[in-house]
Amino acid sequence: MPDVELKPQVYKDPRPKEFFDPFHARVRDHEPEPVYEFVRTVTLLWALIGFRARAFGTEKVPNGPVILAPNHASFMDEEAFASAFEILKRGGAVVMYCEGGRSRTGGLAETARPGIGRLALEAGVPVVPVAILGSYQVRNWKRLQFPKVTIQFGEPFRFERIEHPDREQQQAAADEIFGRIKTLHADLAALGHNGAKRAARERGRARRSRSLPPAPDRARRSRSRAS
């Protein structure tokens, strides 16, 4: 059965700039509204139950400020950049997509848009590449089909801060970020949903074993507690 058809992509919102100004102003001057936590919780439960969404590597995400860079798409205008910088200044997290359009097949675009490169260079904060597998089929719930969605976080990295990067520098940084996303996504696709879960469990066991003291020390500690 084919996937549910996506609506045509619209890159320019017909509403005037003034419509969005109050929202940008509030984001820049205030912490997230209390209703955000409620919406986040409901959305998380829906993702976990409806799409069996699972995220691996969350321990790699540093406390803010941080830029999360997943595959799939969005656009940011100049006002959105200003809001993003204010969020990062106060230690928050910003999610910005690298590509220029939603994927209809689950594949990634050929190139990245330079916007995320500009944000990463001007902010100089850690960037965490994120790979998302299976999200292009989430609209199939309308046919009572609930695909799995798996999210893999990569290692954080950062660029040396450039106050006013030129277009070439922005594109180079965006390409570097997107290259890491592509590698992460290819590895995730090769593993598949179940393979990613097994790999995450193995990494967790390896981390726990590294954090344990040597066997003789554990034995001595056990004897001392017993005595």
Image (cartoon, rainbow, N blue to C red):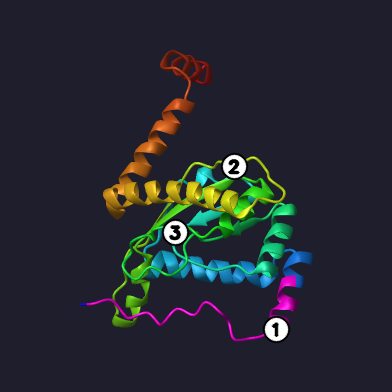
Mark 2–mark 3 Cα distance, whole angstroms, equals 18 Å
Tally the marks. Answer: 3
Residue 88 visible to the viewer: yes
* Residue on which the image places disc 2: 158
User: Where is residue 224 drawn, in percent x and y?
Assistant: 52, 16
Q: Nearer the viewer, residue 36 or 67?
A: 67
> What residue range appears in magenta?
2-24
User: In the shown orientation, is residue 142 left or right of residue 227?
Assistant: left
User: Where is residue 190 drawn, in percent x and y?
Assistant: 27, 49
SS of the residue under disc 1:
helix
Amino acid type of the residue tagged 3 in the rendering: Asn
Question: Dot 1, crowdedness within 10 Å: few (<14), some or many (≥20)?
Answer: few
Residue contact at pointers 2 and 3, CB within 8 angstroms: no
On residue 19, the disc is 1
Q: Earlier in the sequence, mark 1 or mark 3?
A: 1
Q: Earlier in the sequence, mark 2 or mark 3?
A: 3
User: In the shown orientation, is residue 219 left or right of residue 17?
Assistant: left
Question: Dot 2, crowdedness within 10 Å: few (<14), some or many (≥20)?
Answer: some
Mark 1–mark 3 Cα distance, whole angstroms, equals 28 Å
In the displayed structure, 168 sits above or below 2; it is above
Q: Earlier in the sequence, mark 2 or mark 1?
A: 1
Q: Main secondary structure of the magenta part?
A: loop
Question: Dot 3, crowdedness within 10 Å: few (<14), some or many (≥20)?
Answer: many
* Residue on which the image places disc 3: 71
* Residue 23 sits in quarter: bottom right
User: Where is residue 79 drawn, in percent x and y?
Assistant: 70, 69
SS of the residue under disc 3:
loop
Q: What residue lies at 52% left-to-right and 68% top-to-bottom?
A: 74
Amino acid type of the residue tagged 1 in the rendering: Phe
